[in-house]
């Protein structure tokens, strides 16, 4: 079975997926994005009430790895090749427009906060994706740039994973590929229970790996017991309960257990809503508001967290009860404008340019052969 994935819009063409519309778009996947970004947003806005909101970052990682791996698998299945240049260009068209605008906002905010000396390193680390190492080992990153560490972790993973996946697809059978992913999940779980620096890639290896594993389960058929579990209509409600508990309650002795549980719950939810049966949870996640928020989650994550730093600097002494609604209103306005007038037009132009490029130079792809 071949499927076409779009990491920018959570789109997937898969005839068996009833939870999608006729174009293959799975609305509920944007709903997962919405849950993820709202958890992080609420942590930064009112951490006393949502102390575990950082769990949203790991939801993002699972979903992103699921979509990206599916994209690569689908391209290989369709063509027997992967255009790595096009893959990274698609990432650039998706990520850079908002990132460049945000860098201006974050730099201004850092200067206002008296951290102007940190702007150069902070901006460079965000633009070239090494702020995770800077935040782990240095004090060079200004507070307005704090969220950029997770973008660095994600993009570093995508510099390593696509070539590795292609090597497995090219040189090994489907059976070996599946065992490779099973073992990777086991190793990632083991790593999760070792001492980790939160900001480094190893600290979030499990959600990324389990997202890749879930993509293989979806693309090549689910193992019987996994299919039996993820087909159950109650699995979505269980996953949402796990997310709620993880966001609202932080019990340090169970930190690693909760981290692992969230990763598996996210994978189970994704497999459930991309299965062959729609249910109440998938319909709720695919409704209008979650879809709107999820489609703009990248901008909310970038602009929203920085605006929370900026508002108190512009209105000195403002209380949280007044700052919070201003933060939310500004975030909605800035994100909506960025998505409508910058991100979407650039992404559309980039896709068209890539299509024209492929049609004009069909021989430029690297032929990889079939597995």
Image (cartoon, rainbow, N blue to C red):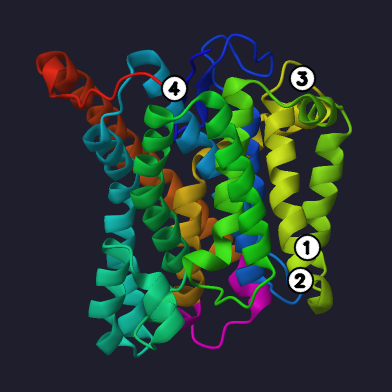
Q: Name the residue under label 3.
A: 278
Q: Mark 1 points at which residue?
A: 258
Residue 46 rendering spot, x and y as whole percentages: 68, 72
- CA–CA distance between discs 3 and 2? 33 Å
Residue 53 rendering spot, x and y as whole percentages: 68, 64
Identify the residue at image location x=37%, y=71%: 131
Label 1 residue SS: helix
Q: Earlier in the sequence, mark 4 or mark 2?
A: 4
Q: Name the residue under label 4.
A: 74
Q: Residues within 10 Å of mark 1 (few under 14, many from 20)?
A: some
In this picture, residue 140 sits left or right of residue 40 = left
Most common secondary structure along the magenta stretch:
helix
Q: Which of marks 4 and 1 is nearer the N terminus?
A: 4
Q: Earlier in the sequence, mark 3 or mark 4?
A: 4
In this picture, residue 258 sits left or right of residue 301 = right
Tell me, for residue 255, which label it has, or none: 2
Q: How crowded is mark 3: few (under 14 residues within 10 Å), some or many (20 or more)?
A: some
Q: Which of marks 3 and 1 is nearer the N terminus?
A: 1
């Amino acid at each position: 079975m071949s499927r076409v994935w779009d990491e920018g819009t959570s789109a997937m063409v898969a005839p068996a997926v009833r939870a999608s519309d006729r174009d293959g778009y799975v609305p509920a996947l944007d709903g997962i994005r919405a849950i993820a970004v709202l958890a992080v947003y609420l942590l930064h806005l009112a951490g006393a009430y949502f102390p575990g909101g950082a769990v949203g970052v790991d939801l993002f990682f699972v979903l992103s790895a699921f979509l990206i791996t599916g994209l690569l698998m689908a391209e290989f299945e369709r063509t027997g090749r992967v255009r790595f240049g096009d893959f990274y260009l698609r990432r650039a068209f998706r990520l850079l427009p908002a990132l460049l605008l945000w860098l201006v906002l974050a730099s201004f905010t850092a200067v206002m906060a008296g951290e102007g000396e940190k702007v150069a390193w902070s901006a460079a680390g965000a633009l070239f994706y090494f702020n995770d190492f800077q935040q782990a080992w240095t004090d060079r990153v200004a507070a307005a740039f704090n969220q950029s560490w997770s973008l660095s972790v994600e993009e570093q993973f995508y510099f390593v994973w696509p070539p590795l996946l292609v090597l497995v697809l090219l040189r090994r059978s489907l059976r070996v590929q599946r065992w490779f992913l099973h073992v990777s999940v086991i190793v990632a779980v083991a790593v999760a229970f070792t001492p980790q620096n939160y900001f480094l890639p190893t600290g979030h290896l499990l959600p990324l790996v389990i997202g890749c594993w879930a993509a293989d389960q979806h693309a090549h058929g689910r193992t019987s017991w996994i299919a039996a579990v993820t087909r159950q209509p109650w699995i979505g409600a269980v996953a949402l309960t796990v997310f709620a508990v993880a966001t609202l309650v932080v019990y340090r002795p169970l930190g690693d257990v909760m981290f692992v549980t969230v990763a598996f719950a996210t994978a189970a939810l994704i497999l459930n809503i991309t299965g062959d049966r729609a249910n109440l949870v998938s319909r709720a996640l695919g409704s209008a508001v979650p879809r709107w928020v999820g489609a703009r989650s990248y901008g909310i994550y970038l602009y929203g967290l920085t605006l929370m730093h900026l508002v108190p600097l512009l209105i000195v002494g403002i209380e949280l009860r007044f700052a919070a609604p201003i933060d939310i209103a500004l975030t909605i306005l800035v994100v909506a404008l960025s998505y409508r007038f910058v991100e979407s037009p650039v992404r559309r132009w980039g896709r068209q340019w890539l299509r024209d490029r492929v049609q004009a130079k069909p021989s430029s792809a690297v032929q990889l052969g079939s597995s």
